Amino acid sequence: MFGAHLAEPADFEGWRRQARVLAQREIPPGDIVWHVGDEPMALFVDQPVNHLACDPLFRLNVPREFLDLAEQVVCHRDPERFGLLYRLLLRLKREPDLLKVATDPDVHRLNTMARAVRRDLHKMTAFVRFRQVRDNAEGEVFVAWFEPEHFIVRRVSSFFVNRFSSMRWSILTPLASLHWDGTALQIAEGAAKRDSPDDDAMEDYWRTYYANIFNPARLKIKAMKAEMPEKYWRNLPEAELIAPLIAGASQRMSAMVKAAPTSPSIRHARQQSRQAELIGGTAGIPSDWVQAATAARSCARCDLCRDATQTVFGKGPLDAAVMFVGEQPGDQEDLAGEPFIGPAGQIFNKAIAQAGLERDRAYITNAVKHFKFTVRGKRRIHQSPNAGEIKACRFWLGLEREFVRPRLIVAMGATALTSLLGKATSISSLRGQITSLDDGTPMIATVHPSYLLRLPDEAEREKETARFVADLNSAKGILSALLDPE
């Protein structure tokens, strides 16, 4: 029997290194005992894998998708996760297309476990609530309590470091704890619920805010409990208001129906009139996607319409779950009238295929609908749109978001990010995290595919391309969690 020792419950690199040694020797899965941390070695184990060397020339090629799934599955609490991954690793050597067989029991179990981990990651990022515990010479200190189902604390740590980098905080969980002092992150042993604070002064303000934004007309109890299961309520300050707000929803909605409608202000009427003039129509704001796409053809909201060949509106199913927002059309898109068909579009197509996403099921558009360029000889050279042009085109992107209503938006490039957030923001400050837009739609940010084309160094280009594909993989995981909350 072979004994494979892992440093901690989600030790992916340790599993990967030892699985490589075992796979080189074709050791059957049944002859391996995986144990973690201080767990005692099983009886009859006579070959510690850590003592075996691996031939440096040995090559073990597996799909990138498997490695991404394995990184997630090692975080699962199932004690057989390491054995399952190793068994699949051996099978992939003989069956390279195994992961495409969704009905295979091992593949089905792998995907189910990965979904559970992604869902747990999403819940932790959504339902952690910090409470202020004291003031000291170094500033405020905040503590949060969360009970994850799986070993996700280390994996999710970067999200909180990036999101709350200016705070000093701790997140306590039964499995492990995170401590951030504003400079360095420490991962410590798990804690008990009694170690976390129960309340702070700001929570009264938060409960007041939550009660005032509660809309009884949009209440869907089943959907709410699917997204925010009751087990998380005890850690949320607003949770104590949920039951009474639900109980009074029907009465409040009846009062809203009986109340007289509010007449639009004169300013609102003037704005609608200006919008109609700017889009070259007289019927006001378009009421559906077809009207919007038609009206956009004669858009004169900025000067870009004078030199561009045509407006390039978004394309894709109007019930798409994910919307990709690029920066602006390029030369080929301007001539064809379709987004992402040029060189950057080819990189985009390859990347989403590697990430397991389908272009035909996504809505693809740009923040700016006209090609901005300068002429050099016979070539039209791309120029970045300015703040005014981005602002002018937010009207069209807003309509696309309203009519498509995607569950997730992927912003590609700084122009897309500026348009979606309404202010200039760097990609690096938001990359790798989920941002909620003004209507509550989750968004993730990544680079534009054209950025990869401009990198002169091949090694750097390969590295950044892999990172771009990883961002799209993250989008797929987030989307799966949103579409399959259970």
Image (cartoon, rainbow, N blue to C red):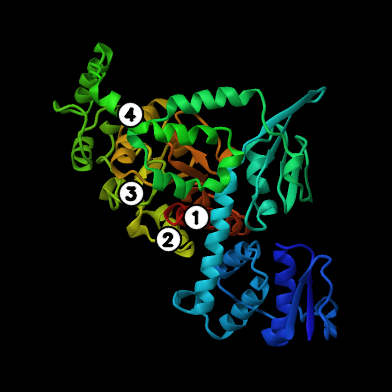
In primary-sequence order, the first of circles 2 and 1 is: 2
Camera-side mark, 1 or 4: 4
254 on left or right of 441 = left
Please name the residue that numbered disc 4 is placed on: 251
Please name the residue that numbered disc 2 is placed on: 357
Please name the residue that numbered disc 3 is placed on: 339
Q: Secondary structure at mark 2?
A: loop
Q: Which dot marks residue 348?
A: none
Q: Amino acid at mark 3?
A: Pro
Quarter of the image where the N terminus is located: bottom right
Residue drawn 71% across the image and 84% down it = 24
Camera-side mark, 3 or 2: 2
55 on left or right of 117 = right
Q: Position of residue 270 (x, y in %)?
A: 23, 15
* Residue 41 found in image quarter: bottom right
Q: Is residue 264 visible?
A: yes
In primary-sequence order, the first of circles 1 and 4 is: 4
In primary-sequence order, the first of circles 4 and 2 is: 4
Q: Position of residue 39 (x, y in %)?
A: 82, 69
Please name the residue that numbered disc 1 is placed on: 472
Camera-side mark, 1 or 3: 1
Q: Secondary structure at mark 3?
A: loop
